[in-house]
Image (cartoon, rainbow, N blue to C red):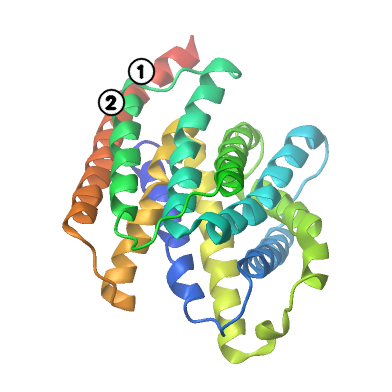
Amino acid sequence: MKGKVAIVMVLVAAMLWGTTGTMQTLLPEGVHPVAVGTARLAVGGIALTIIVLFVGKLNLKSWPIKPTILAALSMAAYQPFFFTAVTMTGVAIGTVVAIGSAPILSGLMEWLIWKRRPIRAWWLSTFLAIVGCLLLFLNQSSVYVDPLGLLLALGAGLSFAIYTIVSKDLVKSYSSISVVAVVFTLSAILLSPLLFVYDMTWITQLRGAAVSLHLGLIATALAYFMFAKGLVHVPSSTAVTLSLAEPLTAAFLGVFIVGEELSFISWIGVSMLLLGIGFLIKGTEKETPRMSEINQV
């Protein structure tokens, strides 16, 4: 599985993440977003663990402890960081800062810390995608900038960037499903105390249970497995930029399912996002043979 297939895996994962917002609109009123994120990780972690044990893929012998803990901490931190940021500073600013900062932070860390320079197409593609994301969310009627909310949103972007970079190194040596199962199980354990902080009775209701299963099984277990699988052949900085297909999917679902309307500026943002992602896909296809030659030297 190389090139186009790996890119498609990452894009499909991002599209599955993009369903979370629409699914949350189906939840009973009063459900705290952090509680949803915690339940999502718990369901996803348990499902992945069962699958990996069933297929016999789990082999913890000589398993790298430090990077695994770092990946688990990053994914666990992302949930409260992101959902609290959105609550404090609004969906528009919180999402743009969190999702938009992740590709920049990922590219910088990959370059400065891991000494892996992003591919040439990444620079323009990331710029187009982030500006497109910003224009897309200008569709929101109310924008409120809270300094602490911005800081938490940056924390969410940093958490996702770290998770992606560390996971890429893990999937080089271990099966993708094993990596995702171990990381998400640890993340769920880290967030488990929050299950006793927030009201979780909504999960016993039919709608609550159905949404939790979708978020845990489809938007988490399946999505992050595909993301990890794609990371084997896609640079982490490229994968994070491709993940900007998440807000794009959320916007389309909002229009066609929820009945929301996008302004003209937002449609320009959609076009820029699509252009940035398409440009990056084309650039990644051209760079893959060159990177393979470099890795063989």
Residue sitting at x 51%, y 57%: 223
The residue labelled by disc 1 is 290
Q: Position of residue 9 (x, y in %)?
A: 42, 49
Task: Judge the density around disc 1: few (<14), some (14-19), many (≥20) Cα neighbours within 10 Å.
Answer: few
In this view of the protein, which residue sits in the foreground, 175 or 169? 169
State the image quarter where residue 56 is shown: bottom right
**Extreme residue toward the left, this view:** 264
Q: Is residue 213 left or right of residue 269?
A: right
Q: Is residue 258 above or below residue 105?
A: below
Q: Is residue 37 above or below residue 98?
A: below
Could you tell whether 143 is left or right of 283 in the image? right
Could you tell me the amino acid type at mark 1? Arg
Taking the image as shown, residue 269 lies to the left or right of residue 63, namely left
User: Residue 91: x and y, percent?
Assistant: 46, 59
Locate residue 128 relative to residue 243 in the image: left or right. left
Residues at discs 2 and 1 in contact (Cβ within 8 Å):
yes
Report the residue marked by disc 2: 286
Mark 2 is surrounded, within 10 Å at the Cα level, by few (under 14), some (14 to 19) or many (20 or more) other residues, namely some
Quarter of the image where one finds residue 281: top left
Give SS at disc 2.
helix
**How far apart in space, not on screen, are marks 2 and 1 (Cα)?**
8 Å
Figure check: 141 above or below 289: below
Q: Residue 26 — which label? A: none
